[in-house]
Image: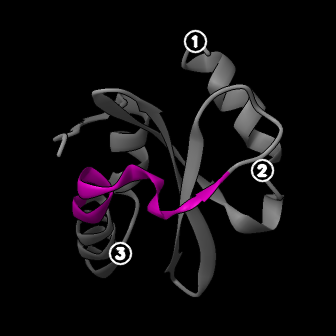
């Protein structure tokens, strides 16, 4: 079995700072599961990259952590607001160089 390495982007870490402690714990727990099997979450369609999302809620708002599987790394890219329907994803990917 392969061990994946989590590599959070600086952008993701900045976004993480804005979340509640509960959300941070939840994301941390879910990321530990991603390390074991990064394909457990739903893949985001329409991109040539292996992008996946983790669902969570912060202050009663639906959000998503977006990550990229790039063996052996898992690049944690950003957090999106669910209500924006992934509109920001293209913009963020561009900023992050994808």
Q: Quadrant of residue 33?
A: bottom left
Left or right: 80 in relation to 34:
right
Which residue, given by chain and number where applicable, does mark 1 sit on? 97
* Label 2 to label 3: alpha-carbon separation: 20 Å
Extreme-top residue of the structure: 97
Residue displayed at 34% across by 29% down: 10
Q: Secondary structure at mark 3?
A: helix
> Where residue 78 sits in the image (x, y, percent)?
51, 43
* Spot occupied by residue 86 in the image (x, y as percentages of width and height): 77, 50
Residue at the spot of label 2: 86
- Vertical placement of residue 49 versus 6, above or below: above
79 or 75: which is nearer to us? 75
Q: Earlier in the sequence, mark 3 or mark 1?
A: 3
Tell me the mark number nearer the camera, choosing from 2 and 3.
Answer: 2
Residue sitting at x 32%, y 54%: 17
Number of labels in the image equals: 3
38 falls in the magenta region: yes
Q: Write down the region rendered in magenta.
A: 32-43
Secondary structure category for the residue under label 1: loop
In the figure, is residue 90 to the left or right of 94?
A: right
Callout 1: 10 Å neighbours few (<14), some, many (20+)? few
Distance of label 2 from label 1 (alpha carbons): 17 Å
Q: Circle 3 is placed at which residue position? A: 23
Q: Is residue 42 magenta?
A: yes
* Location of residue 46 (image quadrant): top right
Residue 47 on image: x %, y % = 76, 32
Front position in the image: 77 or 42: 42
56 or 52, nearer to the observer: 52
Dominant secondary structure, magenta: helix
Q: Quadrant of residue 13?
A: top left
Q: Nearer the viewer, residue 67 or 23?
A: 67
Q: Few, some or many C-alpha atoms within 10 Å of disc 3 (few <14, some 14-19, many ≥20)? A: some
């Amino acid at each position: 079995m392969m061990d994946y390495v989590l590599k959070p982007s600086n952008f993701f870490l900045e976004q993480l700072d804005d979340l509640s402690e509960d959300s941070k714990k939840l994301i941390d727990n879910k990321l530990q599961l991603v390390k074991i099997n990064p394909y457990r979450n739903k893949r985001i369609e329409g991109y040539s990259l292996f992008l996946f999302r983790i669902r969570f809620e912060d202050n009663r708002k639906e959000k998503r952590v977006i990550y990229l599987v790039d063996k052996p790394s898992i690049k944690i890219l950003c957090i999106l607001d669910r209500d924006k329907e992934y509109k920001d994803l293209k913009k963020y990917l561009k900023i992050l160089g994808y």
